[in-house]
Image: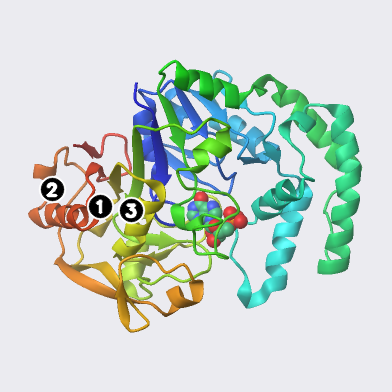
Amino acid sequence: MVSTIVIGAQWGDEGKGKVVDLLAKDADLVARFNGGNNAGHTVVVDGKKYKFHLMPSGAVQGKRCLIGAGIALDPKVLKEEIEQLNWDKDPNLAIDPRTQIIMPWHNALDNAKEASKGDGKIGTTGRGIGPCYADRASRTGLRFCDLVDSKRLKEKIDREFEAKEKILKNVYNSEIPVSKEEIFAEYDALGKEFVKYYADVSKEVSTALEAGKNVLFEGAQGTFLDNDFGTYPYVTSSHPTAGAIFTGLGIGIRPIERIIGIVKAYTTRVGEGPFVTELKGKIGDSIREKGQEFGTTTGRPRRIGWLDLVLLRTSIRLNGFTEIALTKLDVLTGLEKIMVCTEYECEGKTCKELPADLDKLAECKPIYKEMPGFEMDSTATSMEQIPKEAQEYVAFIEKELGIKAKIVSVGPGRKETIVR
Ligand code: IMP
């Protein structure tokens, strides 16, 4: 069987949830390996919208869903998500004991740090992601194995609460909004509730791969939010790139047959940071409205721009994509002309890949190819049924990038998809 990695090729929100849902039908396991509830995946089935933050999107198909050690897990959010989804049976979920837990002081620190930065803020989702991963790196984090052990949980809360309270008070003139005792009571109850999901995900995925099972690896966020290779510091604190499946789940390095880059037919980003093809006027506003480009997690309006092939070329190299899935093509309908950025002008030269230095990136200017617009709806089931100009748009992207778009999404629903 073919195992598959699904990765956001841009800055997140490319429509990974829909593609994961589509592929999950044939998967034995669906595993998440990075990020936390900063993610927001939307899956639409028969007009019903499912919004996920933590739960792998394979849950809609009733698949076994795994949360790997590389995740930052907010157990309060997981509880809400399970309740809101209103499943008639318990989700078939496994959480690795090594998974980091987001605690209330992480949210408090995330917000206090952002507020203290003024104009230099990153524009985080405020979900405590950065401080939680910082604690992992500092070796002071709480993990799922601590959450389910009352004695250890109490010891760690006692220690961390004091330390974080001091930082919040003395550095940020802020505080943890709940008492240590309340935190213990709430998190101890969550640990007792979730202990049934305790499972060694690292072993389970390794064994499944050795047995030739089909594992679907579901990335969250997008390549350019990668903590190392994204537009640092305007990035998240995990690794949304394909290589992270090995470290985020704890499996040995091996070839994975299909690595799909999810590419939105235009570009969006949420939060601060350079955006070479950004559209600030009416065209951007109309794409935002048509594409419903508002954050699933925070509701923030997303910044909009033309498709950027410089970004995508870099993304293909960083992830080793074997194919792409082009999403939201229908959103471009009705535009008179469509621009595609093929190269940047950077320090008097042209460049085909993203410069590593953010200050240089901020100075880059887009070089565009103009393409004719098209009118289309979401009913097409084959490429022949979409307008000639839209076919040319897809063909141009494939040719410039040297990669095939094997899935083309023409609407939010499961059926509104062309599989080639
Ligand atoms: P954090 O992950 O909350 O620390 O936010 C860091 C940056 O990543 C901010 O610009 C966020 O808007 C962005 N970000 C985090 N998660 C997502 C996502 O799932 N989609 C798009 N942007 C995200």
53 in relation to 346, above or below? above
| Residue that appears at 41% across and 44% down | 7
User: Where is mark 2, residue-wise?
Assistant: 386
Q: Secondary structure at mark 2?
A: loop
Task: Tell me residue 30's x, y (percent).
Answer: 47, 28
Viewport quadrant of the N terminus: top left
Q: Is residue 26 left or right of residue 242?
A: left
Disc 1 residue crowd, few under 14, some 14–19, many 20+, Cα 10 Å: many
Residues at marks 3 and 1, CA–CA distance in whole angstroms: 8 Å
Q: Amino acid at mark 2?
A: Ile
- Mark 1 and 2 residues: CB-CB less than 8 Å, in contact? yes
Q: Which residue is mark 1?
A: 329
Q: Residue at x 46, y 19 (%)?
A: 210
Q: Position of residue 172 (x, y in %)?
A: 81, 67
Q: Earlier in the sequence, mark 3 or mark 1?
A: 3
**Mark 3, residue position:** 264
Determine which quarter of the picture holds residue 213: top left
Q: Mark 1 or mark 2: name the one nearer the start of the chain.
A: 1
Tell me the element at label 3: strand
The residue under label 1 is which amino acid type? Answer: Leu
Between the residue at mark 3 and the residue at mark 2, the CA separation in whole angstroms equals 17 Å
Looking at the rendering, the quadrant in which ligand 1 lies is bottom right
Q: Position of residue 89 (x, y in %)?
A: 56, 18
